[in-house]
Image (spheres, grey):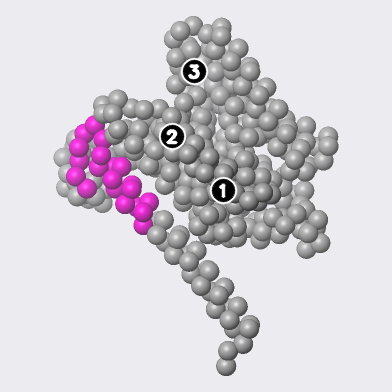
Amino acid sequence: MFTPESGLEQQYRQIVFRKVFFLIAAVILLFVLTLYSLSHGAASISVSEALGALFNPESNDSFIKTVIWEIRLPRVCAALLAGAGLGLAGAVMQGILRNPLASPFTLGISSAAGFGASLAIVLGIGIGSNSHLIIISNAFIFALAAFVLVFFLARVRGLSPETLILSGIAVMYLFSSMTSFLQYIATAEQLSAVVFWMMGSLSGSSWLQVSVMGVVFLISSPLLMLSAWDFNAMASGSDSALTMGINVNRVTVVSMVISALLTASIISFTGVIGFIGLVAPHMTRMLTGGDHRFLLPSSSISGALLLLAADTLSRNLIPPSEIPLGIMTSFIGVPFFIYILLTRRKGSIS
């Protein structure tokens, strides 16, 4: 016998099925794109040769093994981890702050990392035994310093979403202006290095960098996804979440700290990569809805797809030249961002 309850249950199951289907389809698409990215580049390698190098390295010659294992695979893995991390961090920030423009850029993390890298390149100030390590450590330290400064400023007026965003914008402009000053006093060679870093790149990816990003992502992502129910409750407002027994301030601080650490660990290696943390959660929300149990993993997969697609295009559009990754992500992100701006409902983050 049909009852209203059974009808609602069936409808809920259909919704969950669609979201699970999207996740499975996205993973399959990600696998296909990974194979395409491994087999296309300056040196043309067939898909079968790429698969052979991956799963049976002894069956291929040394050239193919070198191209796959030492050049392309670290870069592809870096793109997957960086995109997944930025997509996840962006979804968490948008969910907590209930703002469609929230992202690592909005909170000043990326601009601070850019200043740290510029400080190392132009003045040689930083921690490390060589110039590359100094740039990485500076970018990481200043990214976290910006986040601490944002929280310090926000606490003066209370940890509301509005004060966090306004504090982030102020910090973003502060570090952007200091980076501009360093560019002004830099030599032509130093200026070129700063601009290149600010555009983002995966060309220097190594297995060490992939390992660091992978460890940070594997630790932070489960912690964030375990808070999915809290994010769902907070989506209806802090007051509603408090009535459900959720410590809003604690969830906000812990989740934002984890997101900041994840973002800093990524951009310290890759440089500034824009729009992934902004666009991936929006694209996913349009397809799966606002339930963070599905939104967070889906945003992570979507971010990996977007960044790997952008990196693959940057390597193959004008061979043998390589278009900076930040330019490609902007080409992908800006049209979608304008679409979101024109179509989203007032007061909604979807």
Q: Main secondary structure of the magenta part?
A: helix
Q: Residue at x 60, y 78 (%)?
A: 8
8 is higher (above) or lower (below) than 315: below
In magenta stretch: residue 25? no
Q: Nearer the viewer, residue 157 or 55?
A: 157
x, y percentage for residue 38?
29, 42
The amino acid at mark 3 is Val
Which comes sooner in the sequence, label 2 or label 3?
3
Q: To which residue does mark 3 refer?
A: 194
Q: Report if the CB atoms under discs 1 and 3 are less than 8 Å apart.
A: no
Q: Nearer the viewer, mark 2 or mark 3?
A: 2
x, y percentage for residue 254?
69, 46
Q: Residue at x 66, y 41 (%)?
A: 257
Q: CA distance from mark 2 to mark 3?
A: 21 Å
Which residue ends up furthest to the bottom in the rendered image? 1
Please tell me in which quadrant of the rendered image residue 158 appears: top right
Which comes sooner in the sequence, label 1 or label 3?
3
Decide if residue 58 is in sight here.
Answer: no
x, y percentage for residue 260?
62, 39
Give the magenta-colored segment's residue range: 28-47
153 is higher (above) or lower (below) than 223: above
Which labelled disc corresponds to residue 343? 1
Q: Residue at x 25, y 39 (%)?
A: 40
x, y percentage for residue 298?
50, 55
Which labelled disc corresponds to residue 331? 2
Q: Nearer the viewer, mark 1 or mark 2?
A: 1
